[in-house]
Every structure is written in structure tokens, then in C-alpha cells.
Image (tube, rainbow, N blue to C red):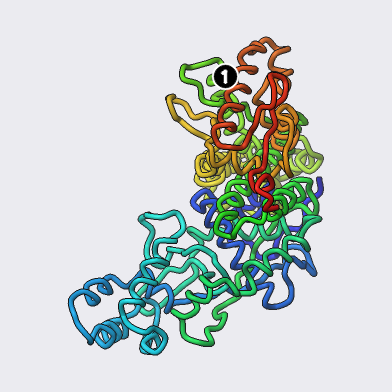
Amino acid sequence: MNRLPHPNRIDSSMWVDEAIWGHRLYDEQTPWLCIMEFLNVLQSEYGGGRAFKEEKYNSLQYTAYPRMYLRNILFNNPRMGIIDKGFQNTQWDIWIEEMNKNPGGMKGADFSYLKKRFANFNDFVEIVNFLRSTTIEGENNKRWSSQFIFPYGPDCLYEDLRVTGNNISNDRRFFGRTGELLYLMLSRSKNKEMILDYLSKKILNGRSPFNRLVAQLQPDGEELVGEKRQGGYLPYEKLKEYDLLSEDWLNLFKCNMPNYDVFPHLVNITGLHMINYLLNRSKEILKDSNQTSFILEIIAPQKTIIRDLASDSYSQNNNFSRQAVEEYVLGIKNTEKWNEVITSDAPYESARDLIIKEFSWKDDDKANATTAEGLLNEFSKKVTARHKQHVQNFHRVWGKEIGLVSKRSSRRLRYAPTDSLLKALVLSNVESKMEFQEFLEILFNKYGFIIGDRQAGKLLEAGQADMESFSENAVRLEERLSSMGLLKRLSDACAYVENPFVKAGIR
């Protein structure tokens, strides 16, 4: 598949991971923070009338809110509780004086506007404590400037920042551009207009009561400031993965759950699609035309052959991205360009020029090799070392975060879905009710999930497992779904997976 041209400006020392998957899949950015970064991008583009519109591919430029008043109040406010309990009638004056002294990331701050917005200091404290309780990912050890509250609306959205004294700077540790990739994927999907319609009504219009509450904590007229964020790059114009992702988003929206309920499912489903995207692009580089597959163990009381197969499936998938970058680099040996290099009068210099041109290598002057092939092999090792730092971890880290990958009752990682992921799969794929075997087939065709014996045909033919093991695996899933209120058995031969929101007449 033809890739879109890479950006004119490349800040990294090489352009390999980014050329295959985009700029960038980042393991330290969790699926939740990917959604938060996505919403920041969408808010900025929506305000400029450009939401999900690309006049030119990979030309995204946006600005995000810092919201330093809100963040200081919520996450850099350690003495609020002490002041509330230790003083009478003067809490406001003492607290405002203390906050004005040295707020993080601000000069000349004045928090006195809050006194006019709340009947008393105790009400203010209770509201702050409530909003703190909605912190994304709950208790964590992130710095205060990298804490985020639930996205009730536009006034809850702000970017990840590094704060040093009164100075703030954009940071890419927890907003590592994966949210920009998500935004670009949905921008290129066939359902982007319907997704925008939903998000504009439910989030971006700011009418949520909780969003209005958050707005009360902030001064009027805060504006988007700072340099525009740019550099997001998605290599492909169109992919079926974009449309499948957008379809699942729409199906979740159609359940008509409150925003507070739908977001966890959006997070899990988005994470699953991102993992599939990583593996599918890897297999494309490796010229592996087999469907990406995941052997899922529905956890049994005792170890079964499915557990070993699920572990082997995980290990195989976990190696694909590393194999892909090696093939992407060393595969150049099979091209006419490389033949011209090794037959030239100066092979080493020609090889260096080709590597710089093809992979944007900026540290070529640090190479130790003395031959053309040695230089390419040395560069390949540097590429692999860089890949192992973040992108190779993506499959493992995100798999754990969404409830797909587990070590439960085992020493090895394997695919063993949690209840939260299973519920997200039901809500994303079952419009009202669906026959259980049809549900298993959809999971196989759409995500590559191998659960029952019908989906394990190739494994059975190869003698890797027996039909009974996979049949029992499917039965365990049926029992799990039934215990969660997501399946009803009508007879020995008929079981239906049900969407509880439709069953209750909500959809």
C-alpha cells in the first residue's frame, strides 16, 4: 500500500516506526489518555469549524487549553481541607491569599473570583472533592500537571503540561500523539459526520450540568494559547480499520447510555482497534496475508490446552512489530536501489546516502561500520533498539489496560478477556439480540478472536488442539455472559446474546 508523504520536518533521529504506523503509537499513553488527547484535538478543530476535515493530509495543527486555574484548584491545592476545618468565617480570605502566593504555572494569579460564585467555602470544598474523585485512572503517581478529570464537556479538556515554577511547557509523555492518530483515523472514516454529530451534542456544546459546574471553577474568557501542536502523521489515506473503529463508536453511541457510562466502553474498544491496527500493519510489511488472530482463553478453574495456545498466540503477535521494522529496513537489500549502491564506485557513501534518504537517519556520523552492508545492519540494530523502547511495548501495555492480556493464574501472558472488555464487545456488536454462535463468528471476522471450535478450524486441522477444548471454551464464555446479564438461553440448542440497553427499551 502506498504511504502518504512524510512531514517536511522530522524531529526524530530516524523515520521507521512512524513510516509504518504513524506518529505515533506510544506505550506510556494509556487508552484513557488517548481519548483525552483526541478530545482536545477535536475541541480545537470544532471551534475552528474544521472538525474531522483535512484540507491536506497530515496537515493537522491545533491548540489546546492549559486551564491552569482549574488544575491548581483540583490538583495543586493541598491545604484546602486544613483551611476548611481549621478556620471559621475567614476560610475564603486565607485560602485565596495562599493560592495567590505561588500558583503553579501562573504569574499574577487571582483566585478571588471564586468567592462570588459559591455560597460558602464548604460548598466549594465539596465540589472540588467530588471532581477530584472523577480523576481519570483514579489514584496514580503522575505529577499534578498530568492529572485529568472526566470529560463531562469542553470546560473539562486541557493538555498535558510540564510546570516549572511559573513556566509551563507542552509535554509528550502522557499525551504522546496517539490521540492525534485516533483523531486522524476517525477523520478518514466513513462515519465521521455521525460521530461528530453525537459528540457535538453530548460533549462539545457544554450543556452538561457537570461541565457547567467545572466552568464555575474557572475565570471567564480563558483562551487557547501557545504554539499550535503539529506533526501528527497517519500513513494511509483509507483503511478498513478506520471504518470498523468508527462503526463500533456509533454502535456504542446508539445504546444511548449516559456519557459517564459510554466512555469506559469507548476506551476499551478503541484500544482493541489500535492493537489490531498495530498488528495488521506489521503483517503487511511482513507480507503475511493471514488474518490477525487472538486465541482467547475464557478462564477455567483448571489449566487447559487453550491456556497454552492463548499464550503462544500472544507471544507470536508480540513479535510481529519487531519483525516488521527489521524487514522494513533490511528488505531494502532486495531493491534495485541497493543493487546500485553495492555496484557503485563508493558503496559505503552510497549506502549512507540511501539510508538517509529512505529512513531520515540523522545520526549517520556516529556509525562504526566500514562497509555498505555493515552500515545497513548497524542502522537496523539501532532501529530495533529504538523500537523496543516504546512501540514494541504497545501491544502488551494496551492489551493489559483494556482487559485483553492477563497473567491471571499463570506465569505467562496470554489473551484472557475481562468482564469489562466482554461487555464492550457485546454493546459494540449486538444491536438488540444475537444468536450466540453468530456473536462468536462476528468476533472472529471483525477482531480475529478465536473462542469456539468453529473459529478454530485451522488449528484443529493442524492438530494443535481438539474440538472439545474449544467447545468447552465457548461454553465458559456463554456462562460468563449469562452471569453478567448479557445472554439468555431459551433452550438446549438456542442461546442469545442480548444488549441490556435495548432489552430495557432504552435504545
Q: What residue is shown at x 39% (from left), y 72% (from top)?
A: 127
Q: What residue is shown at x 55% (from left), y 36% (from top)?
A: 484
Question: Eyeballing the image, is 501 above or below 453?
Answer: below
Identify which residue, 462 or 123, lies in the foreground.
123
Q: What residue is shown at x 24% (from left), y 76% (from top)?
A: 84
Left or right position of 293 against 141: right
**Quadrant housing residue 49:** bottom right
Question: Eyeballing the image, is 230 above or below 179?
Answer: below
Residue 6's x, y, as percent? 72, 58
**Quadrant housing residue 375:** top right
Residue 336's x, y, as percent? 81, 40
Q: Quadrant of the N terminus?
A: top right
**Quadrant housing residue 425:** top right
Identify which residue, 129 or 1, lies in the foreground.
129
Given the image, on which type of amino acid does mark 1 rest? Answer: Ile
What SS does tag 1 mark?
A: helix
Looking at the image, can residue 291 be seen? no
Residue 466's x, y, as percent? 65, 11
Identify which residue, 438 or 313, lies in the foreground.
438
Question: Eyeballing the image, is 247 above or below 443?
Answer: below
Left or right position of 74 against 502: left
Question: Eyeballing the image, is 356 above or below 466?
Answer: below
Residue 18's x, y, as percent? 65, 52
Looking at the image, can residue 434 be seen? yes
Identify which residue, 331 or 333, lies in the foreground.
331
**Residue holding disc 1:** 306
Left or right position of 389 against 470: left
